[in-house]
Image: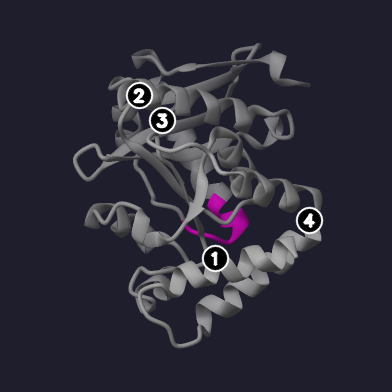
């Protein structure tokens, strides 16, 4: 099975019938990972489909295979490609990458001046984001829209986020800014992690230690955290 076995397209109104299945798979995936996501109802997902703000994937036999949707924040200044999910039986075929590419393309078409961002703990998503031109950033560079951060309430790490006053948490923040070009360090960041799974595990352990027990610092504390992580990875 490979990517040629799938159709990845902008979702059409008739695809709303898959909304419940999509939400169920999102919840199961989050449960399996032991992390939380912003929970969405079938009605919410159906609305994204109706508005032309989502991408859906099917196996060539017509079986639903994957999904992702667009959310906008701060009056359209920021865009997030949210809810990326691939059906378990269709994973390891490059489908997540294809869906992310398609939703990224759709986001750029609909919101050409918007900054596109994401929060993730997943190595695979970090790699895909880096390939698309995202760069690791501090939380202060993301949208400060209260509604966005409310979506983190369903995450098991929400208490950490609150305790840190939304300055940092276990997720890595990544941002695509259309006004800038992708930096080499972002590409190297993802490539090194992909080549060395054990290095990624150490990266996450160190990040957890620094997030939970940071040294006293001012507003530049989180930027210092990222610098420490990159120095460790690329020394």
Determine the CA span between mark 3 and mark 2. Answer: 9 Å
Q: Secondary structure at mark 4?
A: helix
Q: Is residue 133 visible?
A: yes
**Can residue 71 be found in the magenta stretch?**
no
Camera-side residue of 127 and 178: 178
Residue bearing mark 4: 197
Residue bearing mark 3: 19
Choose mark 3 or mark 2, whichever is in front.
Answer: 2
Q: Quadrant of residue 187?
A: top right
Left or right? Give the position of 213 relative to 190. left
Q: Secondary structure at mark 3?
A: helix
Determine the CA span between mark 1 and mark 3. Answer: 37 Å
**Residue 233 image offset from top left, x and y in percent:** 71, 63
Q: Tell me if label 2 and label 4 are in contact, CB under 8 Å.
A: no
Q: Considering only order in the chain, which callout, 3 or 1, is on the residue closer to the N terminus? A: 3
Q: Residues within 10 Å of mark 1 (few under 14, many from 20)?
A: some
**Residue 32 image offset from top left, x and y in percent:** 62, 55
Q: Residues within 10 Å of mark 4 (few under 14, many from 20)?
A: few
**Residue 229 image offset from top left, x and y in percent:** 62, 67
Question: What mark, if any, has residue 226 been given in the picture?
Answer: 1
Choose mark 1 or mark 2, whichever is in front.
Answer: 1
Camera-side residue of 105 and 84: 105
Q: Which residues are magenta?
A: 30-36
Residue bearing mark 2: 49
Rendered position, 182 above or below 47:
below
């Amino acid at each position: 099975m490979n990517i040629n076995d799938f159709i990845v397209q902008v979702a059409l109104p008739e695809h709303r019938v898959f909304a419940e299945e999509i939400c169920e798979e999102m919840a199961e995936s989050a449960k399996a990972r032991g992390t939380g996501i912003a929970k969405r109802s079938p009605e919410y997902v159906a609305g994204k489909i109706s508005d032309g703000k989502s991408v859906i994937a099917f196996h060539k036999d017509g079986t639903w295979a994957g999904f992702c949707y667009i959310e906008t924040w701060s009056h359209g200044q920021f865009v997030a490609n949210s809810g990326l999910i691939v059906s378990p039986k269709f994973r390891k075929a490059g489908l997540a990458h294809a869906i992310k590419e398609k939703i990224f393309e759709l986001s750029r078409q609909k919101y050409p001046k918007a900054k596109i961002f994401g929060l993730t703990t997943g190595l695979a998503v970090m790699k895909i984001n880096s390939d698309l031109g995202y760069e690791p950033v501090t939380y202060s560079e993301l949208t400060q829209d209260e509604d966005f951060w409310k979506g983190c309430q369903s995450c098991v790490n929400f208490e950490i986020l609150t305790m840190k006053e939304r300055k940092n948490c276990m997720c890595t923040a990544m941002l695509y800014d259309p006004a800038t070009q992708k930096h080499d360090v972002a590409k190297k960041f993802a490539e090194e992690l992909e080549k060395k799974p054990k290095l990624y595990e150490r990266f996450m352990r160190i990040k957890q230690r620094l997030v939970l027990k940071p040294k006293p610092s001012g507003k530049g504390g989180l930027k210092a955290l990222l610098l420490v992580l990159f120095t460790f990875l690329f020394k």
